Image (cartoon, helix red, strand yellow):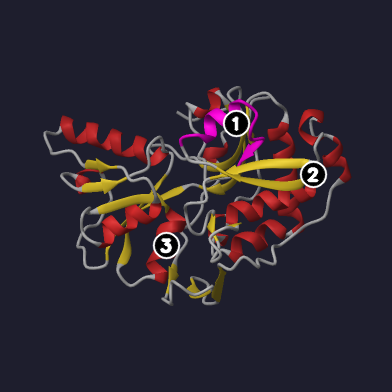
Amino acid sequence: MKHTAPLSLVALSALALSGCSDPGSAATTVDASEGSSIQYNTSPEQDRIRTEEDPALAAKVPEEIKTDGKLTVATTGGSVPLSFHATDDKTLIGVEVDLAQLVADKLGLELDVQITSWENWPLKTESGDYEAVFSNVGVNAERVKKFDFATYRAAFMGFEARADSEITVESAKDISGKKIAVGSGTNQEKILLAWNEELAEEGLAPAELQYYSSEADTILALSSGRIDLNIAPYPSTVYRENTRDDLKVVGKINAGWPSETLVAATTKAGNGLAEQLTAALNASIEDGSYTQVLERWGLGNEAVPESQTITEANYEGK
């Protein structure tokens, strides 16, 4: 039976954080929306949350994947608090890495995290170099043609500007004539291109899209006033708002606009791994380790009640 579209099943509230602290410290504290404090551990000593192997799930991992005893996971390592380098500039940490660790634990595999660029993960996943991608990948109509997915988090994008900016972004008209940084090949780029089409139809000036090679370059351009806005994963924009005094969030949009989408672990289509990732995620949701990981990184309000496998056959998005 065809799945009910998971994109319409989950209605999640915004992650709201407030406060500030030293962005260079290894442990950064901000006040969460619930009134408690979140301690961001950015040191290489993560004391990562772990869970127990599920023998039944481990037995179902495709043989070609479990032969070396590893789950090879790709992530871009360029967005705090999703996946980024610790204070030693070597260790990959973040919510994506932590969730991948839970999945590897449940499947009885060692986690092997590989860093990649956003542009390269699709080809390397198709070729089999990477068995899964945990890097804030949103499900969309183009990707389901080549990849299978195991959903695990809400997918929102945030617009951020300098703290002294008077810009507020709620629709296409709000970006008319603005210089906006965006990642190439991302869902947020698709949104901005669609909004530019709307602006052209209304006879308004389009936004000028700017592309930078790294998040550091993007934020430098934004803070120095060379660009007006940056659109990026919402958790990253909120993190910066609360650990810097020069930036703020000025808008939020679902990454699947005009529909909704979810963030998902991504695998090569048809290799049978997505179903096992889904099962491992659901087992982690059930034992509470999934919730602990998201709350550790201040993302508790982006949790999903269950993981679902999405393939081209059952995808109902646009």
- Give whichever of discs 3 and 1 has the lower sequence position: 1
Asked if the residue at tag 2 contacts the one at tag 3, i.e. Cβ–Cβ closer than 8 Å, the answer is no
The disc placed on residue 107 is 2
| Marking on residue 125 | 1
- Identify the mark nearer the N-term, 3 or 2: 2
Residue on which the image places disc 3: 238
Label 2: which secondary element: loop
User: Residue 19's quadrant in the figure?
Assistant: bottom left
Residue 290 appears in the rendering: yes
What is the quadrant of the C terminus in the image?
A: top left
Q: Disc 3 and disc 2: Cα gap in Å? A: 32 Å
Q: Residue at x 47, y 52 (%)?
A: 78
Highlighted range, magenta: 119-133
Report if the CB atoms under discs 3 and 1 are less than 8 Å apart: no
Quadrant location of residue 206?
top left
Q: Residue drawn at (65%, 39%), measured in percent from left and top?
A: 308
Tell me residue 181's x, y (percent): 30, 47
Residue at 51%, 59% in the rendered image: 81
Towards the viewer: 112 or 260: 112
**Label 3 neighbourhood size at 10 Å, few (<14), some (14-19), many (20+)?**
many
Q: Position of residue 110 (x, y in %)?
A: 77, 47
